[in-house]
Amino acid sequence: MTNAILTDLDGVIRIWSPEIHRKAERATGLPEEAIPRAAFSDDLLPLVITGKISDDEWRRRIADQLSQDFPEANAERAVELWSASPGEVNLEVLEILQTCRKRARLVLISNATSRLLSDLRRLGIAENFDYIINSSEVGFAKPDSNIYFAALNTVGATPEQALFIDDNAGHVAAATRLGIAGHTYTGADSLRQKLNHLGLLQ
């Protein structure tokens, strides 16, 4: 019986429009996609999502890298503009998952920075989860097995009692290898079907 739903945030509940970084790039003289290339590089992203550096430090390093690569652009202002948005909520998915809280505890499990709770509060959804597992707080990021076990231990569930939802198929595969049922998110309809099949929406 499934009594714990472990859900990803970005790409499932939170939507990031590419226009956020593109507007910042256009306004400051950066080439297209310069911000995500710097922000999500293998040199920087692992550090911030495992808590080795803070969100503020991460953004400072992004600006420094952009300034180095594109000295003619206003990199600091670009990062400031890009950082202003907390994203948008996928209200349909949030409503589906909230319905499931009648039968299962809802656990957010996110590869996130130290800004996560602030973002959730700005989005108005901080209270929509029974537990929040932030990779930068536990020190491990998906697909590391330790973050899944941290979520299970927090909610007091065995792998067989949990469902993991993520838009990243590799992260889902990592969960299923631990015995956790998985669902790769591709849209609200298939998610609804999966949860209904498990009896969580009835």
Image: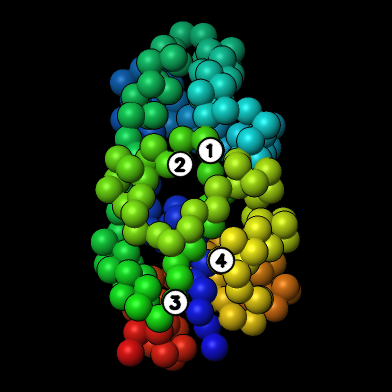
Q: Residue furthest top?
A: 72
Vertical placement of 72 versus 187: above or below? above
User: Which of the labelled discs sits on residue 116, or is there none?
Assistant: 2
Please name the residue shown 55% across and 53% down the image. Answer: 133
Vertical placement of 59 versus 22: above or below? above
Is 35 positioned to the left or the right of 21 in the image? right
Q: Earlier in the sequence, mark 3 or mark 1?
A: 3
User: Which SS class for mark 1?
Assistant: loop
Nearest the viewer among 58 and 64 is 58
Q: Could you say which quadrant of the image residue 144 lies in?
A: bottom right
Estimate the spatial distance between the alpha carbons at disc 1 and disc 2, rounded to whole Å: 6 Å
The residue that disc 1 covers is 113
User: Which SS class for mark 2?
Assistant: helix
Residue 169: x %, y % from top left: 59, 67
User: Which SS class for mark 4?
Assistant: helix
The residue that disc 4 covers is 155
